Amino acid sequence: MADGTHLRLGVNIDHVATVRNARGSAYPDPIRAALLAEEAGADGITAHLREDRRHISDADIDGLMAALRVPLNLEMAATDEMQAIALRHRPHAVCLVPEKREERTTEGGLDVAQDENRLAHFIAPLRDAGCRVSIFIAADLAQVEAAARIGAAVVELHTGAYCDLHAEGRFDERDAELERLRAMAAHADGLGLEVHAGHGLTYDTVGPVAAFPQVRELNIGHFLIGEAIFLGLGPAIERMRRCMDEART
């Protein structure tokens, strides 16, 4: 059960690679960004190796595994290719996410309930290799319970709908989504799952989610990379860390 201990911050560096790839150059270097994030207080680094390699590359994963002192959370689709890459590198954590080539960013959570048998077999060798397997899901009872049944160690609750509703000023719907997140965090924790959350979180929206006592880690990327343009990456991360700590206390 969650006990109110330190809330971890995982910094997603995908969009440093997006900027690099826009010009086909060697910079900005996502590995340099990861090391700066470490210095600024990030507890872990998240990188999504997509099938189309639109941002993070295989060489980036090689470099991150060699350079990082904090854990790497490798986001990936549940494909044979990605499983082989994860088994070769054996990162601290593997987070399974849905993936469509036409999407700009990950849309919605993984439908574990509809693919339970395949996913149970898919994660078994990852778990045996020592990776903590996380499943990125919507705040939905059927998905939480299916994640527990297949043997995942962690669920990461998708906060994108909550953040979008906040940005659109639809506050009643936002509050209802926040309550769904709160209820599913508590339910997942009760099932013995470690609870993480992420997607779309900003300085304005992080507090209510950070305040959930069951949530042990937040993964935040796009917003922090955007703020880094104005503040610098270190100060942007430090401010997010303060927001999280204030909400927790």
Image: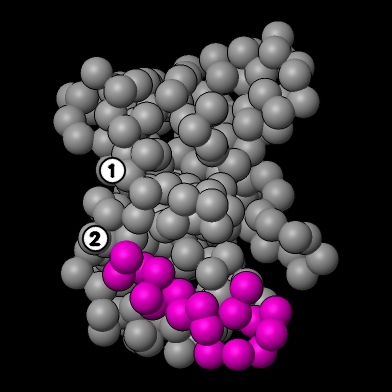
Task: Give residue 245's position: percent from left, percent from top.
Answer: 28, 29
Residue furthest to the top in view is: 172
Is residue 207 covered in magenta?
no
- Residue lying at 18% horizontally and 25% vertically, measured from the top left: 3
From this viewpoint, which residue is outermost toward the right?
102
Residue 21 inside the magenta-drawn segment = yes
Residue closest to the eye, 172 or 167: 167
Between marks 1 and 2 in the image, the one whose residue lies nearer the viewer:
2
Residue 144 can be seen in this image: no
Quadrant (top left/top right/bottom left/bottom right) for the N terminus: top left
Q: Where is residue 53 in the image (x, y as percent from the top left)?
A: 63, 80
Magenta residues?
19-36
Q: Residues within 10 Å of mark 1 (few under 14, many from 20)?
A: many
Q: Quadrant of the C terminus?
A: top left
| Rendered image: mark on residue 39 | 2
Would you name the residue on which mark 1 appears? 8
Q: Distance between the residues labelled 1 and 2?
A: 14 Å
